[in-house]
Image (cartoon, rainbow, N blue to C red):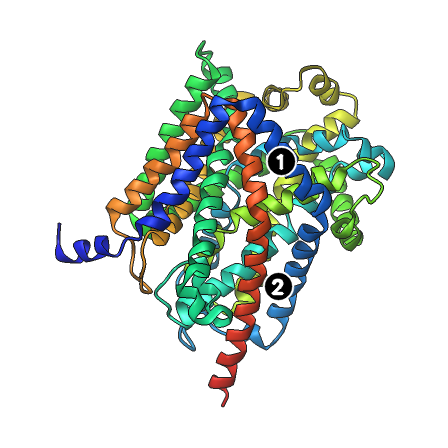
């Protein structure tokens, strides 16, 4: 080992690295040994946070989104994330591709195909109106402005911390230093970092549980293999791990290449479905109507609490989503902030909304409205099929089967999902690697062996969880509960950034 590498190894913070991992592993073991008792207790805790304290998540979500608009439109928006006059490090397309793919993983394809069906079968939709009016609205709402608001406010805070203030601790706690001061280096800062890594691991461990079974179902349909879904899942996870490990170890060049490849396949799929799926008119018209209704009712949707609990819809959906986005905010914003060097804060926020939200909306409009069009025209009855089986994975396979050149579409969907997961986990593994160091200056990268360690750790936990299916939902609930203190930390980071940015402008224009 060379001297520089040895120095880096000496800076590793094993407490921050291993304690959260140990807690997550212990919880997985507990869920496996006593699944019924642990699930019951966890559901009670999760119910408390969602039912009793749900307003907390809604207020933070809307508040962070409004703050992002204020920052972009104010004097803070002109601050360059780097040296004054510095040009962006990446082109807009490359930057946008890395940002979009790191933030959403393959879940976006899974939910784009199927989420409208989940809303269509929810009793709340009958209260609102009918399927045509509202089933396409909620996916756009739950995946667009507020989720990306979380990402972008934190991204500019981290980018400012790294590229302007040039701090050498790439952690949540460091972003709180303008307010916490010396307490950042004490127990308060340690607790914030432990919580952040724990949330990152818990969120990561369950992310694969959402869409990986779909990849397994598509593989079985394509190759007619008689293997169990679990075994196919493991093969997919190992293959994905190989792709993102290879990409990460080749640095940002490898990540950017993978991200651009993913975007090309993603948009190729959307263009094919839009123009050759046979539902072009319905997709465009329903998409435009749903987008308009979402924008018109945005504040109402953001603040709906169902006080009488007639359906529990916001507790089951909106609050759940905001909490899950908060957990994912541990990794994605750091990565977005690091690749945004040379851009102004205004460019980062507005560009992020343009590329990130724009791509998200197009995905749900095209893929979701394709199958909803078949449903509303009476050509297929996906709702009845779902009510009969309750299996979303086979349902999505049947949706793809209804498309022209279905086998080719399945191949593209499968490869795109692998690329999405690989790009997302590139950013997560890089963020986790940075957390492993006490100090890591700007432009300094974690040692490749540390990156490799995290690449392996991040895939081992999902593989282990495949053998205890109940643990997946349990650990997902853990991550939702973890979002409660994470929400407070997000507010603290936003306030710290505003304080530090105000001081910086005072210094610069003095």
Residue occupying image coordinates x 51% and y 70%: 179
Q: Which residue is mark 2?
A: 68
Mark 2 Cα-neighbour bin, 10 Å: few <14, some 14–19, many ≥20: many
Q: Which residue is mark 1?
A: 112
Mark 1 Cα-neighbour bin, 10 Å: few <14, some 14–19, many ≥20: many
Residue occupying image coordinates x 49% and y 30%: 412
Rendered location of residue 159, percent (x, y): 45, 64
Rendered location of residue 182, percent (x, y): 42, 70
Q: Is residue 339 visible?
A: no
Estimate the spatial distance between the alpha carbons at disc 2 and disc 1, rounded to whole Å: 26 Å
Label 1's element?
A: helix
In-image side of 339 versus 69 (left or right): left
The answer to whether the residue labelled 2 contacts the one labelled 1, judged by CB atoms less than 8 Å apart, is: no
Q: Is residue 20 visible?
A: yes
Label 2's element?
A: helix
In-image side of 341 versus 477 (left or right): left
Residue occupying image coordinates x 44% and y 11%: 225
């Amino acid at each position: 080992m060379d001297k520089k590498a040895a120095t880096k190894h000496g800076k590793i913070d094993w407490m921050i690295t291993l304690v959260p991992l140990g807690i997550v592993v212990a919880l997985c073991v507990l869920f496996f040994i006593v699944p019924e008792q642990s699930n019951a207790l966890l559901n009670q805790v999760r119910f408390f946070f969602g039912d009793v304290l749900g307003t907390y998540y809604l207020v933070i979500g809307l508040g962070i989104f409004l703050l992002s608009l204020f920052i972009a439109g104010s004097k803070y928006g002109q601050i360059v994330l780097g040296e004054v006059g510095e040009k962006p490090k990446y082109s807009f397309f490359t930057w946008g591709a890395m940002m979009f793919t790191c933030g959403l993983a393959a879940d976006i394809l899974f939910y784009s195909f199927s989420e409208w069906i989940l809303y269509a079968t929810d009793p709340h939709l009958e209260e609102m109106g009918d399927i045509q009016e509202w089933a396409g609205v909620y996916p756009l709402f739950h995946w667009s402005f507020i989720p990306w608001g979380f990402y972008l406010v934190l991204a500019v805070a981290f980018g400012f911390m790294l590229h302007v203030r040039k701090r050498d601790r790439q952690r949540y706690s460091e972003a709180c230093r303008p307010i916490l001061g010396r307490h950042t280096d004490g127990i308060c800062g340690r607790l914030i970092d432990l919580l952040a890594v724990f949330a990152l691991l818990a969120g990561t461990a369950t992310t694969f549980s959402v869409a990986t079974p779909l990849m397994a179902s598509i593989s079985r349909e394509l190759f007619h293999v008689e293997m169990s879904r679990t075994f196919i899942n493991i093969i997919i996870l190992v293959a994905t791990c190989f792709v993102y490990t290879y990409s990460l170890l080749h640095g940002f060049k490898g990540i950017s290449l993978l991200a651009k490849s993913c975007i090309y396949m993603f948009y190729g799929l959307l263009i094919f479905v839009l123009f050759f799926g046979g539902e072009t008119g319905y997709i465009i018209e329903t998409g435009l109507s749903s987008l308009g209704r979402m924008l018109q009712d945005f504040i109402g949707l953001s603040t709906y609490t169902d006080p009488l609990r007639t359906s529990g819809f916001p507790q089951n959906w909106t609050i759940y989503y905001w909490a899950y986005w908060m957990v994912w905010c541990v990794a994605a914003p750091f990565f977005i902030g690091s690749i945004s060097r040379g851009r102004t804060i205004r460019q980062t926020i507005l560009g992020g909304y343009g590329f990130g939200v724009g791509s998200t909306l197009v995905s749900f409009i095209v893929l979701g409205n394709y199958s909803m069009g078949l449903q509303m025209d009476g050509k297929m009855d996906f709702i009845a099929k779902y009510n009969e089986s309750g299996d979303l994975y086979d349902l999505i396979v049947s949706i793809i089967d209804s498309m022209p050149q279905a086998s080719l579409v399945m191949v593209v969907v499968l490869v795109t999902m692998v690329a999405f997961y690989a790009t997302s986990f590139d950013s997560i593994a890089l963020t986790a690697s940075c957390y492993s160091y006490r100090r890591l200056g700007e432009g300094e990268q974690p040692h490749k062996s540390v990156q490799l360690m995290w690449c392996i750790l991040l895939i081992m936990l999902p593989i282990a969880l495949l053998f205890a299916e109940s643990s997946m939902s349990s650990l997902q609930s853990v991550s939702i509960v973890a979002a409660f203190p994470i929400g407070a930390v997000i507010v603290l980071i936003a306030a710290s950034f505003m304080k530090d940015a105000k001081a910086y402008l005072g210094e610069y224009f003095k």
